[in-house]
Image (tube, rainbow, N blue to C red):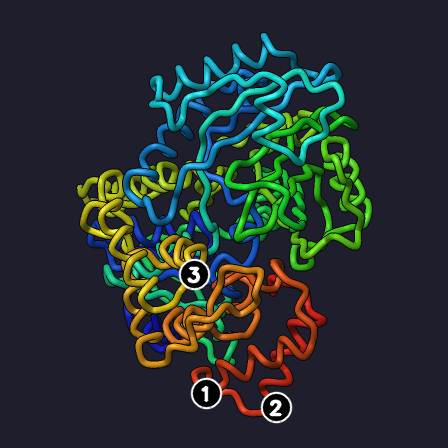
Amino acid sequence: MKRDFSSLAGRHFDLLVCGGGVYGAWTAYDAALRGLSVAIVEQGDWAAATSSASSKLIHGGLRYLETYDFKLVRKAILERQRLLELAPHRVWPLRFGVPVYKRSRIGMLKLKAGLMLYDFLAGFPDAEMAHRYFNHARFSERFPALADDGLKGGFTYGDAQTDDARLVLELIAGAMDAGAVCVNYCKLTGLTETSGQVSGATVQDQLGNNGTEVRARQIVNTTGQWASASAPGRDWCRMSKGIHLVMPAVLADEALLLTAQFDGRVFFMIPWYGMTLVGTTDTDYKGDIDQVSVESNEVAYLLAEANHYLKTGWTEADIVGSYAGVRVMMRSDHASPSAVSRDWELKTANNGVHYSIGGKLTSAREDVAFIVDTVCAQLGVDTPCATKSQRLPWAPESNYEQWSVAVIARANQLGIDRESTQWLIRRHGKRVGEVFSVISKTPRLAERIIPGLPLIYADLLFCARNEMVVHLDDLLRRRMPLLILAKLDGKALRRLAETVAVVMGWDEVEISREVEVCRSGPCPR
């Protein structure tokens, strides 16, 4: 994956996609697979905003059953199943536990009914995904970190997990393989129109300060919170902020779905890269869309709610990392953001620009198929969507289970520990052999970067060399999320910057500048 701003100039594209989050990446990938000439530009790094600030879940949305949003749940569950099949390296099963206490807002019978409906909407899944009941003793044994006082028992059910930023990156890589021009750190500065209809855009290279006009027959805006701040977007959108905390490990390989005591809304505790991800909040947001940060009152809320359920409570000193993101939803009169539908719609402005509004990480692929269908209809192209059945770009072609066994055996020969191997598979899919080649040449690169995290030096160097990294925080927040998984001081950041300096072409001045941004600047950029 090589960045080339100059490839935007002098061409007339069928489609220009503005915004490099999950909806933009899926749009570029889908359209390129259909044979359209495609360009996608992103003002920062790929997945730099909301698409790297999610709960990292591919799920049906059990909580939406309470608002009778059965259509959305069914849609998301079917997409979850599709992605589990098409991208087993990128989307993997994750079971959730739901404890029931004497004080619980939802009791055993109501929860049982909801889970039966969830299974029904999933087409009565196999044992890996179907719900199960556990009495007090067995549920407590399964989740030993949970407080026992008042625990009546609980259920588990199946959903799935991903690494959101790497999902976006894989789609961008797939779009490039299919012929799309993909440029990060490239800012949209204006639209050009002919007879009142959009005919292109002007863009600015954020690295070289060069500008160019990109001619395009169709334009799709997938910029999320920036679209909501535009003139048409203000009438279509509502913004909601959510934060997550990264905490020490208290779970094994299953997650928890919990209900907040304060306001009754759902939040999660999720195992992620050996740590615990806690979130999310859900509050209306009208602040600066370029500076979305974690506030102290939001931290206090999540800690208090988590501590209602834990035997040993957390304090602020236990927080390893945190991040905030802004969801864009369809405009609604509901007082609470949590009551607003997470469904999606496509709007088209008078000048012909298409705007993607709302949506979910899970259902983005299906929503985007509609976007590209619309674009193709405008262009007179009759090519069906390929993403319904085509495996993701980095998915192994052979039987996944057999392939995984062979990969694990090879990793063991190279001295890579089992947990790091599992995450290498999830992060790189069939490209994992290229990471192994790095270790074959330099065996010490099989070592973990930080002892408690399953991320190794060979992976760091591979990402720096091959994944369109521009800045250190691209590498340490989105290619591998070390900035939120560990408390990295200036010395540790410099060590990592120096490790990749030759690959990145950084001199001492640039190393110092990159380290300072990671120490003091907000992440993502």
Q: Describe the element under mark 3 as helix, strand or loop.
A: loop
Closer to the chain start, of discs 2 and 3, is: 3
Q: Is residue 169 visible?
A: no
Residue 502: mark: 1
- Please name the residue shown 66% across and 26% down the image: 333
Residue depth check, mark 3 versus mark 1: number of the one nearer the observer: 3
- Please name the residue shown 32% across and 80% down the image: 441
Quarter of the rendering occupied by the C terminus: bottom right
Amino acid type of the residue that numbered disc 1 sits on in the rendered structure: Val
Tell me where residue 161 appears, x and y as whole percent.
46, 41
Instruction: Please tell me which residue lies in front, 485 or 473.
Output: 485
Depicted 88 relative to depicted 321: above or below: above
Amino acid type of the residue that numbered disc 3 sits on in the rendered structure: Asp
Closer to the chain start, of discs 3 and 1, is: 3
Q: How packed is label 1: few (under 14 Cα within 10 Å), some, or many (20 or more)?
A: few
Instruction: Identify the residue position indicated by label 3 in the image.
Output: 417
Q: Describe the element under mark 1 as helix, strand or loop.
A: helix
Instruction: Identify the residue position indicated by label 2 in the image.
Output: 509
Tell me where residue 187 appears, x and y as whole percent.
51, 67
Q: CA distance from mark 2 to mark 3?
A: 36 Å
Amino acid type of the residue that numbered disc 2 sits on in the rendered structure: Val
Tell me where residue 313 appears, x and y as whole percent.
77, 40
